[in-house]
Amino acid sequence: MKAKAVRLHGAGDLRLEEFELPEIKDDEILVKVISDSVCMSTYKCAMLGEKHKRVHEDVAEHPAIMGHEFAGEIVKVGKLHQDRFKPGMRFAQQPALNYKGTMWSPGYSYEFFGGDTTYCIIPSEVMELGCLMEYNGQAFYESSLAEPMSCCIGAFHACYHTRMGVYHHEMGIVEGGKLALLAAAGPMGLGCLAYALCCDRRPGTIVLTDMNEERLERARDLFTQQAKDAGIALHIINTAGMDDPAEYLRNLVGGTGFDDVFAFAPVSPVVELASQVLGRDGCLNFFAGPTDTQFCAKLNYYDVHYNSTHVLGTTGGNTDDLVESLKLSEAGVLNPAVMVTHIGGLDCCAEVTLNQPKLSGGKKLIYTHISMPLTAIADFRAKAQQDSRFAGLADICEANHNLWCPEAEAYLLKNWQ
């Protein structure tokens, strides 16, 4: 079978190319990929090439399909899995395999397994680990976004707290506590905010900061009413130009500091601010992944000793986190579309991936069977002047708080080729 995919040949070398997929083995499954959301981790992989820990050394001879946040339909099932999986099933997948101690993952490590493609082959270890599952939601993009949302969910579950004199970690953020999301008006920060407003351990107060007023205003539009409905005090703050943002943020919560603080940017001032606003037994989650292997920032070790503050970092989620995301999305409780600001086809995917840091907005959602330049949802109405199909997309999204939605996806798949 012919497939078309964006493949990695080396550092900075992504190519959209057509190639032949081999016939599947008895323990493999052939799938049709419909959607893939572009992750900043894919940019890091593309720029590092074979120097990336997840990329095989002979990637020049056996190029890797990019993309790991993908969803689609099962086409053909090897006989060893026919009792569980059937052609036509929609699927979700957890790319964090951790198979037998390796770091191999779709979108980094496999010649025929990844998301930026029309078709791919799911290898046996994915089913062995329970990382392929049936998806029963409305839209493919919700399944794609379950992976980045699982990273948010996993980060919340990984936080921990203690009681004085008791050597036991109580897992999760503090229920009814004070939560700070710093540099968080980007896609992952908004994903965490969306989860915080509906999770089973809801905080009583949430403070979200950033220095980009346009992104902050979008966050206010999306979440202010939802927070009120949930009975949560939400403060969305622009810290640009503040003389002492730490004092300002601590005063917002009575001067005592925060129970849980997430840092969403790998820059020293953000991490140091996170340390400064921790309250007693505060947990700092360094969510952002730096590319600098020597990245450092100041940490208040006085507070570590006397206030029992602590630091952790999370990357990715596990299968339980992904299942939780899917269930919340299917129930209409969690809307992962808050992360998405741009839509495009497979033909723009390589350029988008290589230019991620330069592109404004949030998540870029790729539909692999269409041809479409990367387009901001906010620009659909203006684009309709050149292409009337965008008028329909604009109507649908504007009726949905300017968010991507199942109706928009269905319209796109029907009207674009």
Image (tube, grey):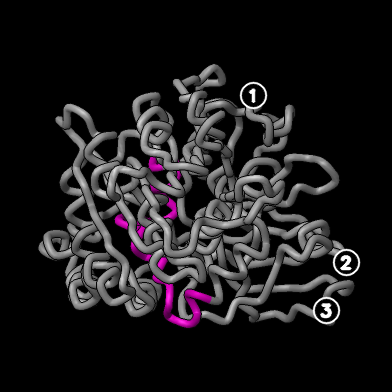
Q: Residue furthest top?
A: 294
The kind of residue on which mark 1 rests is Lys
Q: Which residues are drawn in magenta?
A: 328-352
The residues bearing labels 2 and 3 have C-alpha atoms spaced at a distance of: 10 Å
Q: Residue at x 51, y 56 (%)?
A: 173
* Residue at which label 3 appears: 82
The residue under the point 47% across, 81% down is 138
Question: Is residue 7 in the magenta section?
Answer: no
Dot label at residue 51: 1
As drawn, the residue found furthest toward the front would be 165
**Side of 335 relative to 83 (left or right):** left
Considering only order in the chain, which callout, 1 or 2, is on the residue closer to the N terminus? 2
Q: Residue at x 41, y 51 (%)?
A: 188
Residue depth check, mark 2 versus mark 1: number of the one nearer the observer = 1
Name the one closer to the observer, 195 or 129. 195
- Are the residues at dot 2 and dot 3 in contact (C-beta closer than 8 Å)? no
In this rendered view, identify the residue nearer to me: 83 or 225. Answer: 225
Mark 3 and mark 1 lie on one chain; the one further toward the N terminus is 1
Compared across the picture, whether 288 is left or right of 157 comes to left
Q: Quadrant of the C terminus?
A: bottom left
* Amino acid at the residue labelled 2: Asp
Label for residue 26?
2
- Calculate the distance from the C-alpha at mark 2 to the C-alpha at mark 1: 33 Å
Q: Residue 11 placed where, x, y %? A: 56, 25
Between residue 391 and residue 300, name the one nearer to us. 300
**Is 345 inside the magenta-drawn segment?**
yes
Residue 209: image x %, image y %?
28, 45
Question: How many angstroms separate mark 3 from mark 1 (CA)?
Answer: 38 Å
Q: Residue at x 54, y 17 (%)?
A: 294
Residue 41 position, x and y percent, is 52, 40
> Which type of secondary structure does the marked residue at label 2 adopt?
loop
Q: For mark 2, does the 10 Å Cα neighbourhood hold few (<14), some (14 to 19), or many (20 or more) residues? A: few
